[in-house]
Image (cartoon, grey):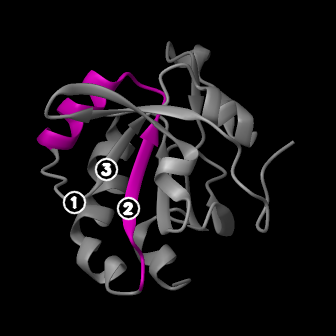
């Protein structure tokens, strides 16, 4: 079953990069008592994710945060080391990257996709959501993985 607006996020554990190396963060650590924009991409460094999707959130970070958002988080079914390299490559300061390495969170949301035909394995669908204290308030899921329109920063800003 796919998560819907009004649903609470499922419990999950992500990996994030810290100055001391990889660390675990739970859904509660990231979302409890906070208003958060969560952006999911099929994969770090993939063309649409790297050139079209992430750059909008980096460019609009201050504007998004100025609208009462506590954090912008980006998740992908990649390992923490790949996401750390991607965040540095994209100069995405002020955006936190969450590794869903095994796709457990994507599956729990019902927003996983089969990318095996492209040699990608199971990945996350592309989406953006606004989460308020662990509850989904806005959910924009792309129908086509190669598009970043419904889930783009400009579209999400209109919902804030």
Q: How many marks?
A: 3
113 versus 7 height, above or below: above
The residue to which callout 1 is attached is 94
| Dot 1 alpha-carbon crowd within 10 angstroms: few under 14, some 14 to 19, many 20 or more | few
Work out which quarter of the rendered image holds the N terminus and state it: top right
Residue 42 lies left or right of residue 82; in this view the side is: right
At horizontal 76% and vertical 39% (from top left) the residue drawn is 110
First in residue order: circle 2 vs circle 1: 2
The alpha-carbon separation of the residues under discs 3 and 1 comes to 6 Å
Q: Position of residue 20 (x, y in %)?
A: 16, 28
* Quarter occupied by residue 115: top right
The residue to which callout 3 is attached is 96
The alpha-carbon separation of the residues under discs 2 and 3 comes to 6 Å
Do we see residue 45 in this rendering?
Answer: no
**Kind of element beneath mark 1:** loop
Residue 72 circle label: 2
Q: Position of residue 54 (x, y in %)?
A: 32, 54
**Kind of element beneath mark 2:** strand
* Quarter occupied by residue 103: top right
At horizontal 19% and vertical 53% (from top left) the residue drawn is 92
Check contact, mark 2 vs mark 3: CB within 8 A.
Answer: yes
First in residue order: circle 2 vs circle 3: 2
Check contact, mark 2 vs mark 1: CB within 8 A.
Answer: yes
Residue 139 lies left or right of residue 6; in this view the side is: left
Do we see residue 82 in this rendering?
Answer: yes
User: Is 85 in the magenta?
Assistant: yes
At horizontal 24% and vertical 62% (from top left) the residue drawn is 58
User: Is 148 in the magenta?
Assistant: no
Instruction: Please state the extent of the stretch shown in magenta in the rendering.
Output: 68-89
At horizontal 60% and vertical 67% (from top left) the residue drawn is 133
The alpha-carbon separation of the residues under discs 2 and 1 comes to 8 Å
């Amino acid at each position: 079953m796919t998560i819907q607006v009004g649903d609470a996020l499922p419990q999950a554990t992500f990996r994030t990069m810290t100055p001391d190396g990889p660390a675990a963060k739970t859904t509660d650590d990231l979302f409890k008592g906070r208003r958060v924009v969560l952006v999911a991409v099929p994969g770090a460094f993939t063309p649409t994710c790297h050139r079209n999707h992430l750059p909008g959130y980096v460019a609009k970070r201050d504007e998004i945060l100025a609208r009462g958002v506590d954090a912008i988080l980006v998740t992908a079914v990649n390992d923490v080391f790949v996401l750390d390299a991607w965040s540095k490559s994209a100069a995405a300061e002020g955006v936190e990257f969450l590794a869903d390495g095994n796709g457990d969170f994507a599956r729990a949301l019902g927003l996983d996709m089969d990318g095996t035909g492209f040699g990608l394995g199971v990945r996350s669908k592309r989406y953006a959501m606004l989460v308020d204290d662990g509850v989904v308030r806005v959910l924009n899921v792309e129908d086509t993985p190669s598009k970043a329109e419904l889930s783009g920063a400009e579209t999400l800003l209109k919902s804030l």
